[in-house]
Amino acid sequence: MEAVTTRVTPRNLNYVGEMYGHWFLDYASYVILERAVPHINDGLKPVQRRILHSMERIDDGRFNKVANIVGETMKYHPHGDAAITDALVVLGLRNLLIETQGNWGNLYTGDEAAAARYIEARLSKFALDIAFNAKLTGWAMSYDGRNREPVTLPVKFPLLLAQGVEGIAVGLSCKILPHNFNELIDAAIESLRGKRSNLLPDFPTGALMDATDYQEGARGGKVRVRARIEKIKKGNILRITEIPFGTTTGSVIESILSANEKGKIKISRVEDCTAAQVDINVYLPSDADADDMLKALYVFTDCEVSISPNCVVIRDDAPVFVTVNDLLKHAADQTRDLLRQELELRLGELEEKWHFASLEKIFIEKRIYRDIEECTTWEAVMAAIWKGLKPYLKQLRREVTDEDVAKLTEIRIKRISKYNSFEADEHLKSLEEDIEETKGNLANLTRYAIGWFKELKKKYGVGRERKTEITTFGAVKASEAAVATETLYVNREDGYVGWGLKRTGDAVCKCSRLDDVMVILEDGTVKVSRVQEKAFFGPKPVYVGIYDREAQPVISLIYRDGARGKYYAKRFKMGGVTRDTVYELTKGTKGSRVVYFASHQNPDKSAQQKLTVYFQPAPRLKKLEMALDLGSIEVKGRTAAGTLITDNAVKRIGPFKA
């Protein structure tokens, strides 16, 4: 058999490219619309909506096995039981729509829930009040065409903002942070009154939050969340009682231990006593400062996290980027509209009840039922009733239909015999009062919606107070928070500097592993580098110390220019430098040498330097010493050449001799 070959042409390549492009767009659209991003109308992803719909279908007030709920949901959700179980557990842990029973895991420790066959759930009363109304629900066929499922649920509450949501789609991510239940209701009321609220997140894990840059939850905003940490003087302990949202006690402890191993913080041990509430004890060494260590925990561990919201929802079958206040206004307006539809439905039902009750009253009290006793055909029965009703039709609020007349024939004799005109009048009066009340609510719809929200808060808002404390805290630089956990050593003969030279070097000062070290060599060169375990700078350094750009000392320097040159004195500050770059403090002449060096953090003290310069004996040199006041030299930049002090060879420089 001959091999079949296909010639590759630009046309074929274009066709393949277009085909894969369409497939990718189809897949991306499916993930965005059907899996990862919530709908603006009910704030739910498809799997969450299908779970709630399934639970409502089988709801009888009792708890159901989660495994049974998952099985019911699989009639609507085609992605397997694991995805449904995970989504159901997340809903259960939010403690809003679902009441749980059994081991559902731990929000603080990150422990997983027990298997679906061991745990139970049912819809909360809150969910039944705000999320379901079959008459106001739009329906679509399920994936296999066997069942109907809701397009969106008629939710009368800003559910999306209360629960929060996170999802990753193709080229798109969604992260809407949770907000406080009672604050959402208050903000919805303000929105109905035409006012705009400043909504800020509230996390179930509590902690402290700086939402200065929240930007209403839009892209580009962020919030910083810190653990709540108490200082316990007895035992030198830092106690963590609340952790940032998105972390667990395990991840926080792991970050603390990792920072300790890297030398960024210094602790003795960590003890996790978490049960119903977070309780992590961080034991500090006896010589550690609790305030410094607290600052370091926020900088180098998960005791502080930055969260970037990205408020994106599905609206009109497409993803749109909005703000949390946009979502709140949409939810408030939608709630008012749903309440209007419910009132209209109720009004129609009340008017139908009044209409038939009035017909029944006429039918019985005017004894029209007796006119049909002799009728032998259905047509004769209908005609007799119509004839009996005709004088009273104007008393009714709508036209009477054949269906109404047929319904009168279904009234049982027992009911006719026990008919009580007084009770019938009272019933009609009650219906009329309900009708007028409903019409009044429709005429004052906004006021009715506000009252509905207030009643919702009164009924379900107890125990839902804000958990996250709103505050502000400035950014802390890593270099400022670094704890001096190491000792800096220098081996002057070999020219090595680092924290690992304890056996071969001399101690210089305490340092952290994030500090920069500045080394000035005898030849007048200087270099700034990150502190390391062991690093070579050059032999015979005249100065080794920590470089602090913000608090730089005044350096006094006397050097010889070249092997036999003149002597210059200068006072300067280092200024800004680039790490690992060598700078010249002299003129750069070969053979230059530093003969005097001093460093002073206090500028006043540096201005009080009086020295005596001793010269090498030489022919015709009558005076072998001279006084030098370094304080009279102006402080300049490190590149300044300095002030000429002598042409003679200097033997040594000593303290001022009066």
Image (spheres, rainbow, N blue to C red):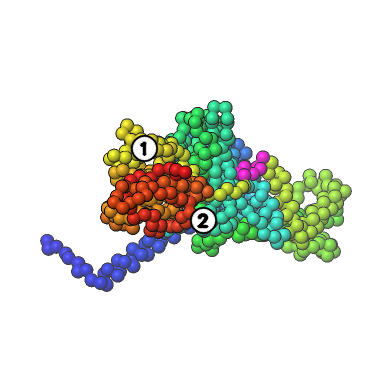
Residue 310 is labelled as 2
**Which SS class for mark 2?**
loop
Front residue of this view, candidates 21 and 55: 21
Front residue of this view, candidates 411 and 518: 518
Residue 376: percent from left, percent from top: 74, 56
- The answer to whether residue 538 of the structure is visible from this angle is yes
Front residue of this view, candidates 236 and 522: 522
Considering the whole magenta stretch, tell me its main secondary structure. Answer: loop
- Residue 149's place in the image compared with 290, above or below, is below
Residue 287: percent from left, percent from top: 49, 31
Pointer 1 residue = 489
Circle 1 crowding by C-alpha within 10 Å: few under 14, some 14–19, many from 20: many
Residue beneath the point at 62% across and 39% down: 61
Image quadrant holding the N terminus, namely bottom left
Three-letter amino acid code of the residue under disc 1: Tyr
Which of the two discs, 2 and 1, labels the residue nearer the N terminus?
2
- Residue 18's place in the image compared with 583, above or below, is below
Circle 2 crowding by C-alpha within 10 Å: few under 14, some 14–19, many from 20: many
- The answer to whether residue 133 of the structure is visible from this angle is no
Residue 331 is labelled as none
**Which SS class for mark 1?**
strand
Three-letter amino acid code of the residue under disc 2: Asn
* Residue numbers of the magenta segment: 463-469
Q: CA distance from mark 2 to mark 1?
A: 49 Å
User: Which image quarter: residue 254?
Assistant: top left
Magenta stretch holds residue 53? no
Magenta stretch holds residue 466? yes
Left or right placement of residue 227 versus residue 640 in this view:
right
Front residue of this view, candidates 612 and 4: 612
Residue 429: percent from left, percent from top: 84, 53
Residue beneath the point at 70% across and 56% down: 190
